[in-house]
Amino acid sequence: MHDRSPEILHNARAWDKLARQQVPLAQPAKDADLVEPLSQVDPLGWLGGSVRGLRLLCLAAGGGRHGAIYAAAGAQVTVADISGEMLALDRAVAAERGLALQTVETSMDNLAMFPAGTFDVVIHPVSTCYVADVGKVFSEVARVTRPGGLYVSQHKSPVSLQAEVRASDGTVRLREPYYRSGPLPAEAPCRLREAGTLEFLHRWEQLLGGICRAGFVIEDLVEPRHAEADAEFGSFGHRAQFVAPYVRIKARRRSSESNFSFLCAQ
């Protein structure tokens, strides 16, 4: 195991604990998830309707759900995560359901065990908030993604991380500065924040610009809708009326720097 930064070590221990507590993000895939697996994870059709035979990395995606779903869809799946307990859930569900997948315990910013261009697709659920330097993550993802390959990632919106977790008077106020360093203050466990973890706010220039600078072209971007018009005051659905909590990005690995330079010059 490579040397880990203090925040990575902290979050590895935190996620081990969350896995043992069987929190919602540590719930393995259910029977219904595996009937039409891609419909569960690719509602926009970004993956072209099939991943059969593709070399697919589920990055920072332990917990027994994502890896199992993509394996059931026919992909050659590797799950990488900092938490051994989360990866144990992937191995357990794979053994139970006869699915083939590999697991690797590592941080999302160190994929040195994979040669360049190893994967056709990298799937990266919400997790970049757990590292201080997101640029390292995108550089590693770019290195292990083949030219023309896809990187589908989801992130916590920086504005959402700035805002107070619960609306106090019918509105949601910005509480954290946009240009801040260091981890965010701890919050009580809720749908927006995970207990015991260290989280970092990454600005749009670090997220979108970082993906582009690493060697990708962004092809699409959506903000999954969680707002509920009749949601209870102060609930997640009520807060989402004011602040979109997440962003999902589809990016493609550039085939060459010269092609990118030509496109930018147009």
Image (spheres, rainbow, N blue to C red):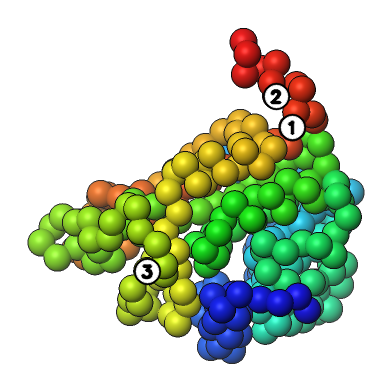
Give the answer, above or below, for where 85 lies relative to 7: below
Of residues 165 and 158, the one drawn nearer to the viewer in this rendering: 158
Residue 238 visible (yes or no): no
Q: Are marks 3 and 1 in contact (CB under 8 Å)?
A: no
Q: Is 127 situated above or below 262?
A: below
Between the residue at mark 3 and the residue at mark 1, the CA separation in whole angstroms equals 34 Å
Q: Position of residue 180 (x, y in %)?
A: 35, 58
3D distance between C-alphas at marks 1 and 2: 7 Å
How far apart are labels 3 and 2 at the CA level?
Answer: 36 Å
Q: Position of residue 247 (x, y in %)?
A: 47, 47
Q: Position of residue 262 (x, y in %)?
A: 70, 16
N-term mark: 1 or 2:
1
The answer to which quarter of the image holds residue 112 is bottom right
Kindly identify the residue that appears in the image at 61 percent across and 31 percent down.
219
At numbered mark 1, what does the secondary structure look like: helix, strand or loop? loop
Amino acid at the residue labelled 3: Leu
Quadrant showing the N terminus: bottom right
* Amino acid at circle 1: Arg
* Local crowd size for mark 1, using a 10 Å CA cut-off: few (<14), some (14–19), many (≥20): many
Identify the residue position indicated by label 2 in the image.
Answer: 260
**Residue hosting label 1:** 254
Please give the name of the residue rendered at 66% of the width and 17% of the height, measured from the top-left corner. Answer: 263
Any part of residue 117 in sight = yes
Does 10 sit left or right of 186 as displayed? right
Which callout, 3 or 2, points at the residue further toward the start of the chain? 3
Residue 55 vertical position relative to residue 192 in the rendered view, above or below: above
Look at the numbered disc 2 and give the secondary structure of its residue.
helix
Q: Where residue 184 is drawn, which disc sits there?
A: 3
The residue lying toward the viewer, choosing from 234 and 263, is: 263
**Sequence-first disc among 3 and 1:** 3
> Could you classify mark 3 by the number of other residues whose Cα lies within 10 Å: few (under 14), some (14-19), or many (20 or more)?
some
